[in-house]
Image (cartoon, coloured by chain):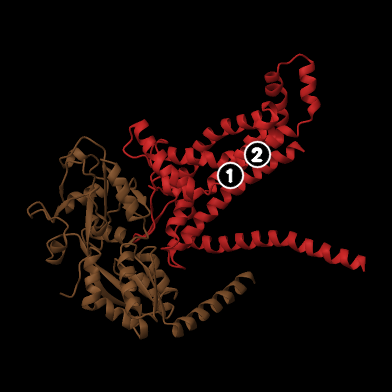
Amino acid sequence: MLRKSLLVLLMCLISAYAFAAKDKNEIQVKGSDTMVNLGQGWAEKYMEKNPNAFIAVTGGGSGTGLSSLISGTCDIAMSSRNIKEKEIALANKKGINPNEIKAGLDGLAVVVSPANPVSKLTVSQLGLIFSGKILNWKEVGGKDEKIVLLSREVNSGTHVYFKEHVLRKNDPNGKEEFAPGALLLSSSQAIADEVAGNSAAIGYYGMGYVSSKQKPLAIAKDEKSEYIEPTIDNVLNGKYPISRPLFLYTNGLPQGLVKKFVDFVLSKEGQDIVLATDFVPINR
Amino acid sequence: MRKIKEFIIEKLILLCGIASIFFVIMIFLFLLKEGLAVFKSVSPFKFILGKSWYPISEPAQLGILPLILGSLLVTLGAAIISIPIGVGCAIYIAEIAPLRLKEILKAGIELLAAIPSVVLGFIGMVTLVPMVKNVFHLPTGLTALSGSIMLAFMAMPTIVTIAEDALYSVPKNYKEGALALGATHWQAIWRVMLPAASSGILAAVMLGLGRVIGETMAVMMITGNAAVLPQSILVPVRTLTATIAAEMGEAVVGSEHYFALFAVGIVLFVISFAINVTADLFLHKKQ
């Protein structure tokens, strides 16, 4: 009884919302925390040019954005990872048809404190460190100090991307997991703060968050390759080994305001904003 | 006319009374319905005693033993810190403090209860966490101990208020009798007042702990959230509450992960229910 009435209430709210969205020129963009500043930048510029439109951008994590797209509470989901098979199946069940749009690239910086003597690592060393097989900094040429692993929470696209591409090295059948002792922090900023104050910590996040209080490591694909710094040029020319696409997901092909906004994102102007927020544009 | 008015008011109040029970039952049924679904894919035994929590992997590993132990460890630590201080404070307020100081102390305790937990968590993150790291020479200060200290602050107002009430309601002639027999003030408190109020004090402790185990925001911010089986109180832990709060946004409605989080909710519900019932038993024993 209570659930039924709650359900009715919810449906009223959703349908009221759907109507409102149609004639009020309003869209909801939600998802990846990595992309929140970027989405905000796009929305501000777009609203400046089209004062009638209203675009609300919120974060919460890639998984959060995709699950709201699936449950119909947002129009565009920002995601820093590909949508999963499972999520597509669930979406189809609910009559939603996720459509993927690549909107930019991001280099994933692996950071340590500036007080840490280690300044370069290979991808496989990173994998061993984050899965808990290398426990001490001296094993990779640092001080005799226990490594403190910092990771994002599981709702983060960054977490999933790092696990699939660094820990499991793109092997879809890989079994590696983050070491259970890894600290799961709730935001990139929290990782940045902890790294700044802890000489034994190592963490990762989108390179837009790197400041002078953290030291980004140079990364090599394997022992024989050269070590590459995470810079925009190196991501663009494909040399930096841990970079990932940033996606927008819409329900079906974009239409109306959603289409106009997506077109703006992919235009030269939209891609300039990508560059201005320390990400890497795609159309060049 | 008056009779009808009485009748209507009585029924209205009855409705209010039933409503609260009704909501509790509905919530509990909903929790059971959503939570028990997880046991289609993982056995209850494996769920409770499993040692790894990787909810988004394929296949997902849903073992909540590290989370249960994390919650219990933080609560135990908070109990060790808050019980002596809380009960001591209650004794001082009820028995020793002069009237004016008593009023000031009580106001202070109420103020402590009014601080939102997220604020305490934030303060803990910037002050307590670096301190714990430096004092114990740890690799990181985001540990169970930091969580315990912060939560002790949250349990104290409850413990002090209820324990003070319990001491206050001990008949005055008990104490007068003890003093008349030649006991010192402290002997009267220790040998007469405390035993007489013991069931109320135990209830106070249990209710304080109930608050600690359900607390979410502050522990999420300062315990590090690493789902390991804790070896000591100086390592990061992940609690049941923080797990639900951190992962609920990601879980797609109807997925295994979603059901697992509801099942974590059931475990939490059972633990705090047990604590509240124990507290209730002690309170009734007193009467």
- Residue B161's mark? 2
Q: For the residues marked 1 and 2, what is the alpha-carbon distance in whole angstroms?
A: 10 Å
Instruction: Determine the image quadrant of residue B112.
Output: top right
Asked if badge 1 and badge 2 are on a common chain, one would say yes
Left or right: B267 in relation to A256 = right
In brown, which chain? A
Residue carrying label 1 = B113
Helix, strand or loop at disc 2?
helix
Q: Position of residue A268 (x, y in %)?
A: 21, 77
In red, which chain? B
Q: Nearer the viewer, residue A171 or B147?
A: B147
Left or right: A74 in relation to B27 = left
Q: Nearer the viewer, residue A79 or B103?
A: B103
Please indicate, yes or no, whether residue A251 appears anywhere in the rendered image: yes
Q: Amino acid at mark 1?
A: Ala
Pointers 1 and 2 in contact (C-beta within 8 Å): yes
Q: Amino acid at mark 2?
A: Thr
Q: Is residue B251 above or below residue B69?
A: below
Q: Position of residue B134 (x, y in %)?
A: 34, 33
Helix, strand or loop at disc 1?
helix
Give the mark nearest the N terminus, 1 or 2. 1
Q: Is residue A26 above or below residue B1?
A: below
Instruction: Determine the image quadrant of residue A142.
Output: top left
Q: Position of residue B72 (x, y in %)?
A: 50, 42
Q: Chain of mark 2?
A: B
Left or right: A136 in relation to B218 = left
Q: Chain of mark 1?
A: B
Q: Quadrant of the N terminus of chain B?
A: bottom right
Q: Position of residue A70 (x, y in %)?
A: 41, 74
